[in-house]
Amino acid sequence: MNVELPKFVRILLTSAALAFGTTAAMSEGLTLDLTQTISTAVESDTDRLVAIFKDIHRNPELGFMETRTAGIVADELEALGFDVTTGIGVTGVMGVMRNGDGPTVMYRADMDANAVEEATGLDYASTVRVKRSDGVEVPVAHMCGHDAHVTWMLGMARIMAENKESWGGTLVLIGQPAEELITGARAMVDDGLYTEHDAPVPDHFVALHTAPVPTGIVAARAGTIMAGTDQIDVTFHGIGGHGSTPQLAKDPVVMAAFAVTQYQLIVSRVVPPLETAVLTVGSIQAGTDNNVIPDEALVKINLRFFTPQTRETMISGIRSINNGIARTYGMSDDRMPDMVMKGYSPPLVNDAPLIERLEEPLAELLGEENVVKEFPPATGSEDAHILPSPHENAEVAYMAVGIADPDVFAEARARGQAVPFAAHNPNFIVDLDAIPLGTEVAAVLVLELMAK
């Protein structure tokens, strides 16, 4: 999350940053008694929530493999009285609690981890390794905080189930697979989330995400906050052969290498300079032996953009470069590179009326200075907003919750670092104090929308 970091320094100078309650006047949706009920419930549930978080962290699962995590979500929600549906979009979970008249609020927590080897040294660190569908064995760890997201949702679910007299409407909780692949939300929708599985149509959609800023801070603002993204696989076809006689082969490794360098010219020389565009090659896979020219090379590409025009410029540029290189190396029309569009999500746009409504209870909970409302859009991306996208009237509120230990954050800043760690970094650590804090934030947001 890109933010104005000086705004965060105040959090390190006041104990209010870690206060999980307030005596200020409540917003229209929440009463002081209800807010105090939330704080008391979270405090008494913290040990259980931390245990759930550590368990999920210790047992991470990649996208569309989240069977254990989905089972935890389903079992917890069923025990609380939610009507639970599993297996939506492979491993997605939906829990529905109907509680009379009122709005329908959908809340999402993503469940998948990263193919990153954890280096935190925590006593609950992941040592998991799995073999993916492509046959490659990879380490797996929650280095983006989705384990916290699931825990926050489960903690909020208990508060909602135990205080049904305080709210009305329909609460829809979603355990979403494969956010990292940018395909999980679309998979749930395409699998009939609203048709085959009868998900109630949301009036409001809420999702939270971790951010490597101090615990006690929430970033929330209206408008475009995250970039759109595409995941693209390009396969260059060649003719394999012996490394000693390259003239008898057509080397796809060389084609891929030239393509990687030329892709960057799309951003620097084709996309208008005032437009934001990011093109990253995250993986090149080809061959196995030193002296064998393979017959294929796979290039994995990620795009970030804020406008459809910039997206199309990058996609068409990639296609032109691929074909031009292949033709230069003498490949026939039926051996042009394959280009597979694996996952797409448009820019994430928060609805102003909903964000403005929710900023007030957040400020009352955390302190006005700890709700960051002004920050530039991030080139990070999400697919959460695809879940409500079939229904244009659903308002979206997506917020970032600080999860860095304030002392660790302060030390990093003193060393000149913007943040102590980034998402997907092997040293990404969720401060355990952020587990109850995020739970309370989730409950306050949902109850603000549903309180009687």
Image (cartoon, grey):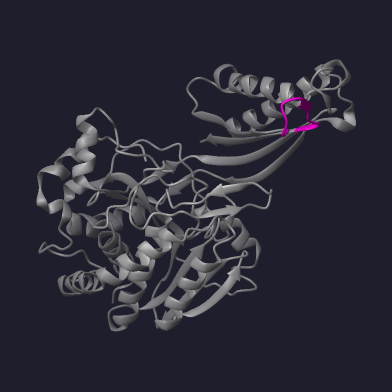
Q: In which quadrant will I find the C terminus?
A: bottom left
| Figure quadrant of residue 24 | bottom left
Q: Is residue 389 magenta?
A: no
**Magenta residues?**
287-296
| Figure quadrant of residue 279 | top right
Residue 28 drawn above or below residue 296? below
| Figure quadrant of residue 1 | top left
Q: Nearer the viewer, residue 20 or 391?
A: 20
Q: Is residue 206 visible?
A: no
Q: Nearer the viewer, residue 290 or 122?
A: 290
Residue 432 percent coordinates (x, y): 27, 57
Residue at the image point whose x is 29% and y is 84% from the top: 165
Instruction: Answer left or right for 7 relative to 423.
Output: left
Q: Nearer the viewer, residue 443 or 204?
A: 443
Residue 312 drawn above or below residue 74? above
Residue 105 percent coordinates (x, y): 42, 68
Q: Is residue 210 visible?
A: yes
Residue 194 drawn above or below residue 232? below
